[in-house]
Image: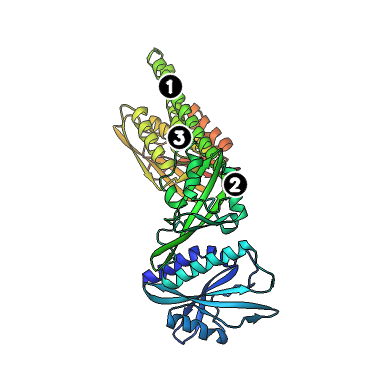
Amino acid sequence: MEPAEIEWLHLLVGDWQVISDLAFADLVLWLPTTDGGFVALAQCRPSTGSTVHYDDIVGSVAPEGQRPQLRRAIEETRAQRAREPRWFGAYAVREEAVPVVHKGRAIAVVSRQTNLGSGRTPSRLELNYVEAADDLVAMVARGEFPLPNAATGPRRGAPRVGDGLIRLNSEGEVLYASPNALSCFHRLGVIGPLGGQSLVEVVARVVEKQANPVDESMPLVVMGRAPWRTDVEARGVALSLRAMPLTDHGHRIGAVLLCRDVSELRRRERELITKDATIREIHHRVKNNLQTVAALLRLQARRMDVPEARAALEEAMRRVATIALVHESLSQTLEEQVELDDMVGRALRLTADVASAQTTVRTVRNGSFGLVPAQDATPLALVLTELVTNAVEHGFPGRSSGTVEVNVERSGSDMRVIVSDDGVGLPLAEDGAAGGTGPGSGLGTQIVRTLVMNELGGTIEWSARDGGGTEVELRLVLRDGVGRAS
């Protein structure tokens, strides 16, 4: 088959649930095979009636008695209805074979199988459903269905047949409205029956009194002229409408309109949008406040005459600025996760530049942090900043240049980070921990140990780097957003 023909079958299967529900019938898509048989490609069961096939028949071959009807449908390019019902065990099934036509050529067959087990007189609703299904099936046989540009996407709240159905004539007047459809429009503020009225005029009278903006495509949908979806909102009620124009050889003869009350769904969506915007605004304000604190610390540091006090304030300023970077990233996304690579890159470059004015330090990062939960992003960023600051301040005394390398290995939630430098290295105590003026005694190292062990639940080890310098290995398991990942 041509790619366009395969896509046509995909579109049909994506939208044929409507036909199955309207017809109270199972639909099976049969494709002819080279040996003269037919194989089932897809099937659809009605949500409005009893099914014929309780087992999945996709991939099975059509029985011998059904093949002549399917073959005639393809050869004659018109629907074939069996004169006598076919029996499936204890119940009879009426079968109709409808050719699937694409650009004048029959490429497959849809078998419409209706369970006749009920044996009761159909209601007015059922008669209108079946008449609408007949129109759509005839469009399939003429190559006019599936409808081009139809709204078959996964939009939440899409109306279904059982939610409410309205049949329109070519002028957009209501021929029939199901009880559920009448209830939907009554909740919208429409009083009385809809039969015989122009639906677009009815909707216009309702929405013209509202201050809400109106979708530009709404008139085309309400008149049944375009196969789109739209929402109508009035009096605190929201209706989702979907139009399916009915055509006969290219001439519009009417439309089927599906409607559903989605007021609660739209209200919840608006609440979520409001909450997301509020959360982002909170992160933005926290970032601004932290930047203000960092600026105050910087001003205070400049007024300090004691070098040790000035250095302590500058370190505090860098730590606050690092936390502000995390909240800045969170303020730009709806997810409670941070893309840590860019943020860490900025923080490390800033740290290397500020930590040592006499030494030119180059920072290199290998590997990717990826998305990190917000509750882990702040302590992890602080730890990396402190480690790089410590390497720059203590690793290159008397040198004009140096390199700090950050290597990241991540597998799912497991993360391993190695921060190494090519400096002079740090003295180690007998227990293997850094001693003297090294990692074991400074405030920065105490902060690192506390964050790694208490906040991140990980481990950290200092060791001598091969070829000179210091290497710090950090291992942790990222949280899953609710609790600690296992």
Callout 3 crowding tier (Cα within 10 Å): few <14, some 14–19, many ≥20: many
Q: What residue type is labelled 1?
A: Thr
Which residue in the structure is indicated by mark 3?
A: 331
Q: x, y (%) of residue 214?
A: 44, 41
Residue type, numbered disc 3: Ser
The residue identified by callout 2 is 192
Q: Where is residue 271 in the image (x, y as percent from the top left)?
A: 55, 38
Q: How many marks do you count on the picture?
A: 3
Residue 479 coordinates in the image, percent (x, y): 56, 44
Does residue 335 appear in this view? no
Marks 2 and 3 sit apart, C-alpha to C-alpha, by 50 Å
Q: Residues within 10 Å of mark 1 (few under 14, many from 20)?
A: some
Q: Which residue is drawn at 60% across and 56% down?
A: 178
Say which element carries label 2.
Answer: loop
Task: Pick whichever of labels 2 and 3 is earlier in the sequence.
Answer: 2
Q: Do the residues labelled 3 and 1 touch (CB within 8 Å)?
A: no
Check residue 404 in the rendering and tell me which mark sits there, or answer none. none
Task: Specify the farthest residue to the front.
Answer: 196
Q: Give the residue type that dot 2 points to.
A: Gly
Give the residue pinned by disc 1: 292
Is 212 rendered above or below residue 162? above
Residue in the image at 52% along x and 84% along y: 67
Looking at this view, is 79 or 372 the one in front? 79
Which type of secondary structure does the marked residue at label 1 adopt? helix
The one of 350 and 106 positioned closer to us in this rendering? 106
